[in-house]
Amino acid sequence: MGFVFDTTPVKAEAAAVQAVMDEYRLPLENGVIDPDENLPKFRQALKDAGIDTVIAEKQRQLDEWAATK
């Protein structure tokens, strides 16, 4: 539909979030690690990495983009 997220304003946070995803995603998806124990750790690691900042920036950009459509 034309929207492309520019990660430049949150470059450090986006990189940190990606590192957390790289660490947890496949082990969780493949059942290699216990989700009861590791999902809370994964969620906290995402928060610590700045996922809320990334989400807020993406929402800001999306709102700005949508206002022009």
Image (cartoon, rainbow, N blue to C red):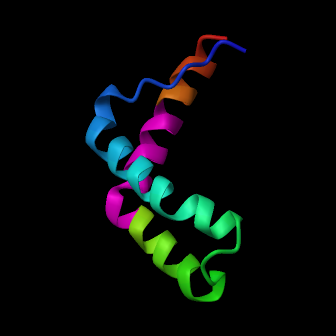
Magenta-span inclusion, residue 59: yes
Residue 57 image-quadrant placement: top left
Q: Residue at 33% across / 66% down in the picture?
A: 48
Q: Is residue 47 above or below residue 19?
A: below
Q: Position of residue 44 (x, y in %)?
A: 43, 73
Q: Is 34 or 44 nearer to us in this picture?
A: 34
**Location of residue 4 in the rendering, given as x and y in whole percent from the top left corner:** 55, 19
- Outermost residue, front side: 32
Q: Residue at x 60, y 79 (%)?
A: 33
Q: Position of residue 10 (x, y in %)?
A: 32, 37
Residue in view at x 42 percent, y 44 percent: 54
- In the image, residue 44 sits, relative to residue 8, either above or below, namely below
Q: Quadrant of the N terminus?
A: top right
Identity of the residue furthest to the bottom in this view = 37
Residue 69 covered by magenta stretch: no
Q: Quadrant of the C terminus?
A: top right
Q: Is residue 38 left or right of residue 50?
A: right
Total marks shown come to: 0
Q: Which one is nearer the viewer's eye here, 19 or 50?
A: 19
Q: Residues in magenta?
A: 47-60
Q: Is residue 62 above or below residue 25?
A: above
Q: Is residue 12 left or right of residue 42?
A: left
Q: Nearer the viewer, residue 10 or 26?
A: 26
Up-down: is 5 above or below 42?
Answer: above
Seen from this angle, which residue lies furthest left? 12
Residue lying at 48% horizontally and 27% vertically, measured from the top left: 61
Q: Main secondary structure of the magenta part?
A: helix
